[in-house]
Image (tube, rainbow, N blue to C red):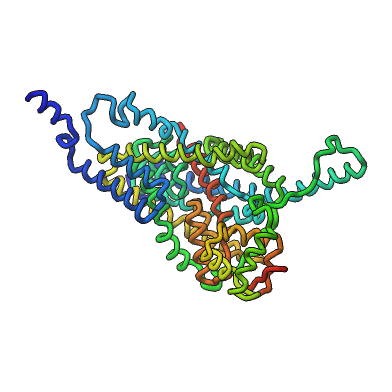
Amino acid sequence: MFGFEAIAHHNGWSMAVAGASIVLSGLAILSFIISQLHKVVELTEKRVSKDSARGEIDDPSETPATILVPDHCPTDLTATAQVYKTLTVDLGQKFQLIELYALAKQRKFPHPHLDIRCLREAGLLMPLGDGEFKLTD
Amino acid sequence: MELLFQFLSNTGYYLADYRHVIMLIVGIVFVYLAIAKEYEPLLLLPIGFGIIVGNIPFFKGFGIGIYEANSVLHYLYFGVTTGLYPSIVFLGLGAMTDFSSLLGNPKLMLLGAAAQMGIFFTLLSALGLGFLPNEASSIAIIGGADGPTSIFLTAKLAPELIGPIAIAAYSYMALIPIIQPPIMKLITTKEERRIKMPELRKVSKKELLFFPVVGVVLCCFLAPASIPLLGPFFFGNLMKESGVVDRLAQTARTAIVDTATIFLGFTVGASTQGDVFLNGRSVGIFALGAVAFSIATASGLIFAKIMNLFLKNKINPLLGAAGVSAVPGSAREVHLMGLKSDPSNYLLMHAMACNSSGVIGSAICAGILWSFNIG
């Protein structure tokens, strides 16, 4: 048995439609829930900080502070920024990230992609628009 | 003299036929591709060498071959037939995965789901070509572009096809740089490829801690048959994010996953013998694998374009191709394609979000297909 006859005989159409619908709807629901996760976290943190203002926290060592990711960034980002600043002698004050990355790789800097990402997220690598960036002083 | 002839008649030289020779050449080609071309070396090298070892002819009945009880290879193969190695590999994968980019833009998860349509299209194609439902499901999961998932499901549904399906899955994963770019160029326009994605929202530590718990409950309640894969996956991720069991997380993503990968690849290769591999069905499996990867890529891209009809802030449709869960190959190809269109367009982190969602999606699909074929 081949072709459409074989597909119909083995319930292929219903398996395909049901399977596709299940995986799409399942991930859509998961996507919706995780989009609301940060609101739930903010709500719990607000409650904790309200309680601490009233002095009702059970465990005073708990802090509601949010720890930002990534957590694998270099511990001293300022020192990293100073190292990358040496590249601006060749690149100029304004440069594109691809140029910074290429020069960092050429000079055999370890983990240039991670460093550039961490510098951007810490605000030490500022966008100037039109794809150009500069390192803050 | 008689003893000498008896010995010689038990050697591989005497027992070899053309199928052994062909499979040895296939194994050597895989080893070459892994070392010289660096095509997925972590898998192709163990698989290639396993094919060489598994196709050395021997006198059956002495407990040597992988299919003979009490042989060393048979004991090692236990991890494949029971689905143990794929579960361990998923534990390590979870301990390596950073979900911050996915949590920062959760709608990218839908692209990971869309890319799994390749699985169901291939299911229909395989049934149409005359494969039985359990075989068709095992072939279809190649479209998930996830080696351990393919091996896991095939071990449960059609263990005799583990060899060709694993080799097809890993071969096409290695060929992602050849398969995906033409499809990406065909389906997207230059303007669409230049769309810049907004900065990802900063994600808190608590969100990263909640996600594996929420994810495992939601996904495994939906498809309980995916528990052996998604359970260890989210557990590994929770170990990584908790920060209190760094030693365990480190071991999971290094020693444990590497050990499982070695034995998985080696025994899958050794189980791929000429009589199973060198026939028309294997050709069909390879052809369907190509279809699966292509449809998966195309469906992710098309879904992204459909999403853009409804979104105010458009997403770059190239990210749909990263929903194919060949981590990190498809994410890298999407990033490179984005850079070609606009050198300042960095799509890697967004593509990794789609990639990790694709891993979850393909594991759910495996659970769904397993459920459909039980009984």
B225, B231: nearer the viewer: B231
B130, A75: nearer the viewer: A75
Q: Is residue B370 above or below residue B194?
A: above
Q: Is residue B332 above or below residue B137?
A: below
Image point 59% across, 36% down: which residue? B248
Q: Is residue B205 above or below residue A58?
A: below
Q: How many marks?
A: 0
A50, A86: nearer the viewer: A86
Image point 65% across, 56% down: which residue? B105
Q: Is residue B256 left or right of residue B164?
A: right
Rendering coords of residue B19 (x, y %): 21, 42
Rendering coords of residue B288 (x, y %): 37, 51
Image point 68% across, 49% down: which residue? A34
Quadrant in which the N terminus of chain A appears: top left
Rendering coords of residue B209 (x, y %): 68, 43
Image point 63% across, 63% down: which residue? A83
Outermost residue, left side: B1
Q: Is residue B48 left or right of residue B223?
A: left
Residue B68 sits in quarter: top left
The answer to whether residue B33 is visible is: yes
The answer to whether residue A131 is visible is: no
Outermost residue, right side: A54
Rendering coords of residue B21 (x, y %): 21, 44
